Amino acid sequence: QKEVEQDPGPLSVPEGAIVSLNCTYSNSAFQYFMWYRQYSRKGPELLMYTYSSGNKEDGRFTAQVDKSSKYISLFIRDSQPSDSATYLCAMSAGRDDKIIFGKGTRLHILP
Amino acid sequence: GAGVSQSPSNKVTEKGKDVELRCDPISGHTALYWYRQSLGQGLEFLIYFQGNSAPDKSGLPSDRFSAERTGGSVSTLTIQRTQQEDSAVYLCASSLGSGSANEQFFGPGTRLTVL
């Protein structure tokens, strides 16, 4: 079993819909969780950063961590065509530890 | 300010040839990472430099791969005797320090195609 599992998609949703992106992981030591967004032909950029369990909201984006289930989610409200990108989850056990990335989910928001 | 830059943006080479990929990190960033991204494979860690410490080479897939970082700044990833399975996008990232506490800033990548 890979340390981090993420459905590659593609996921296509109509503009304005709520998007849910998810990752599961196997290492219970992971405490730091990130979501990166990667546009086509660009490098990934950090979107959300959370520590331990709970929710974190930033504008239309909400990151949710459930450590008991080893499951993290990214929700996008009022999705826009400009949200079309690949979203990668990432996590690490400690602040100085290597970051492990998921394979990424390709998201298409249809106008 | 300027972000992470990588060159070339695209490289096409023949099987068996050597290639060098360059990364210019953000000025002042002490940590530098190389990743490989293949279709459907996500980001694969290759090597990590932090200041003057010995690099973490644990992700290099074979001894054909090597990297150096001169003067704590520019880094070069070298692939010797390239194989078709080396075709991928090679991404470089830099950060102020190590680990998840410091945001990694990625360059646009070098798209390598081995014929």
Image: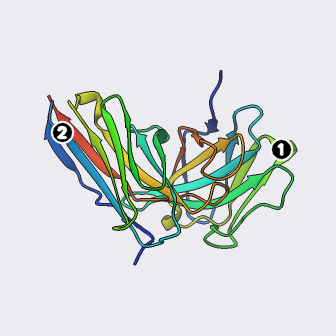
The reply, left or right, for residue A61 in relation to residue B55 is left
Residue pictured at 48% horizontal, 42% vertical: A44
* Real-space Cα separation, disc 1 to disc 2, in angstroms: 44 Å
Q: Nearer the viewer, residue A86 or B12?
A: A86
- The kind of secondary structure element at disc 1 is helix
Quick check: marks 1 and 2 in contact, CB under 8 Å?
no
The amino acid type found where label 1 is placed reads Gly
The reply, left or right, for residue B2 in relation to residue A110 is right
Q: Position of residue A102 (x, y in %)?
A: 42, 59
Per the image, the residue denoted by label 1 is B72
Residue pictured at 28% horizontal, 36% vertical: A84
The amino acid type found where label 2 is placed reads Ile
Question: Does residue B63 lie above or below B27 as drawn?
Answer: below
What subunit carries mark 1?
A: B
Per the image, the residue denoted by label 2 is A18
Residue B109 occupies quadrant: top right
Residue extending furthest toward the top: B1
